Each structure stands twice: as structure tokens, then as C-alpha cells.
Image (cartoon, rainbow, N blue to C red):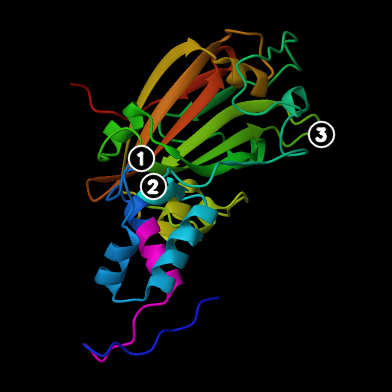
Amino acid sequence: MGHREPANSRTGTTPLLWSTIRDQIIRDIVEGKIPPGSWLPTNAQIQERWEVSNRTSRRVLQELEQAGWAQGQGTRGYLATAGPAPQQIGQPALPAAFADATLPDTTRRDTAPGAPRPAHTIPINGQIPAEFARLRIISVGYEPAPAPVAYALNLTGPGAAVCVRRRLVVTPTTDATPLEVRISYTPGVHPDSPLAKPQLLPDTWPDNLATHTGHRPTTATSYISTRPAEDWEAVALHLPPATPALVRLTTLAASGTPIDQTVSIWPAATTTIQAEGHPIA
């Protein structure tokens, strides 16, 4: 780890550790203040802003590159990236049909229809009841936000780094029949947060967001449509290629500010969305 530098002669204060500066720059990338593809602060700029030595500023940039948040460009400096590559989770987290595939894989096709799956009725903003489902991690990491996600989350634009959690929902039975692909896009997640780790989390997704972001979702806005399942979705769900899928985009907001968008993909033939108690216009 780094050593604390001596007190600055001009201010009498103790300069920040390199790890603190590194974490601040990571937060700036995650929050969109430094978009991926733009230049990171130079050695000289880091030294000036934080009043540290050349040795410390160089270490900050080297640590950012090693952690996957920067890409060296020789003598020109460092470019910000969207963060470390997603951490793919191998067997047994992936279903057998694509355990040897790398997601997303648009070349593989699973022509077998798979085991019969139970039908489910899901509340318009809810999930399959926990007693009928188990979660498995597919991948967790930072990726550039797709344009629709960036728009829904009021980000600075497409390409802003967001934490992406891909999960597979399966039956709790021994055959673990896949029921749903679930993808959450969450901005502002620090790499040390449990949300950025490839591990299952307790509680519901809104509760986990409240615990680990400090913002409790108060509203949910959902859009539901149908489309053919993408190749990798069909493989994950044990469906023939281009099988109709039911897709729900749910944006969770806290006090009017979007904090997460979660996409759920279900087999259309066995999934019903329920909405009741709405006032009649």
C-alpha cells in the first residue's frame, strides 16, 4: 500500500493517500463526470489538485489502469474506460445448455426445446414468487450504458459506465428449469460495493438498492413488449432460436431520480403479466 506523504509546506495539511485519489477518480467515472473514452487527469493535474508528489500521481494512474479503469496511451496520458470487464461465472452457475459458452454469444443456438416449464403469473412490477424460483449469477461488471438505458437513467449519454448484473432465474427443482433472464443496470456503484461483486445478495432488489446505494426506490415505471428472444437469451432459457419472449423494462426511482433499470426476459408462452386495481380512466 502507499505511504502517507509529509505535510504540505504551503497548507500544513497532510495530502491524501494514492488510494483515496484513485477512488475519487473512479467515482467520477462511474458518475459520468469523466465519461469513458475521455482523458483522465494528467500527472501534473493530479499533483496540482491534490498537492501530491509525482511518485504518488504516477501510482494513482498505474493503479487505475491495473484495476481496469484506465487505458494507457503512451506519453499522451490515460483514457478512462467503462471499468473492469464483466466477471463471467462458470459452472454450475450457468445452465448446462450454455455452460461452455461465453455470454453474450450470438453464434450458438440451442435447438432443443428443453424441459417443460411451469407457467407463471407475475405482477406488473413484481417478480416470480421466491418459493418457485432461485437466482443464479451469469455475470457482474461495468459496461457502457446502452442508449435506451442512458436515457431512462438520465445519464450524460450512451457510454457512461454502469454496473451490470445479469442473473438467471430457475426453478428450485433438481432440473433447474430456466424461467427468466434478469439484467440490472445501476449507475454510481462503487467497485467495492456488494452490488459490483459476483455474488448473490439477500433481500429483494429494491431492498438491496436501498442498502448499498443509500437510495430507497419509491416508484417503478414499467414498459412491457414482445420480441424474438436474442440468441444468447434463447440459449440461457433453453428455447429454440427466435422464440417469442416477453420483455419488461422497469425503471426504479427514488424521490423522482432514476437509480436503476432492470430488464426481465421471460418465455412468452408460459408467462402472464397481471395488473389489477388500477383506476378506470
Mark 1 and mark 3: Cα distance apart in space: 45 Å
Give the residue type that dot 1 points to: Gly
Tell me, yes or no, whether the two marked residues, 3 and 2, touch with CB atoms within 8 Å: no
Judging by the rendered image, the residue that carries numbered circle 3 is 174
Image mark count: 3
Q: Residue 167 at x, y = what percent?
A: 59, 37
Tell me, yes or no, whether the two marked residues, 1 and 2, touch with CB atoms within 8 Å: yes
Q: Nearer the viewer, mark 3 or mark 2?
A: 2
Magenta span contains residue 15: yes
From the viewer's side, name the closer residue of 68 and 144: 68
Judging by the rendered image, the residue that carries numbered circle 1 is 37
Q: Secondary structure at mark 3?
A: loop
Mark 1 and mark 2: Cα distance apart in space: 5 Å
- Quarter assignment of residue 27: bottom left
Q: What residue is rendered at 58% in x and 28% in y? A: 180
Judging by the rendered image, the residue that carries numbered circle 2 is 80
Q: Is residue 3 above or below residue 154?
A: below
Instruction: Report whether residue 77 is seen.
Output: no
Give the residue type that dot 3 points to: Thr
Q: Residue 85 at x, y = what percent?
A: 55, 42
Who comes first in sequence, dot 3 or dot 2?
Answer: 2
Q: Which residues are magenta?
A: 11-26
Image side of residue 217 versus residue 269, left or right: left
Image side of residue 110 versus residue 83, left or right: right
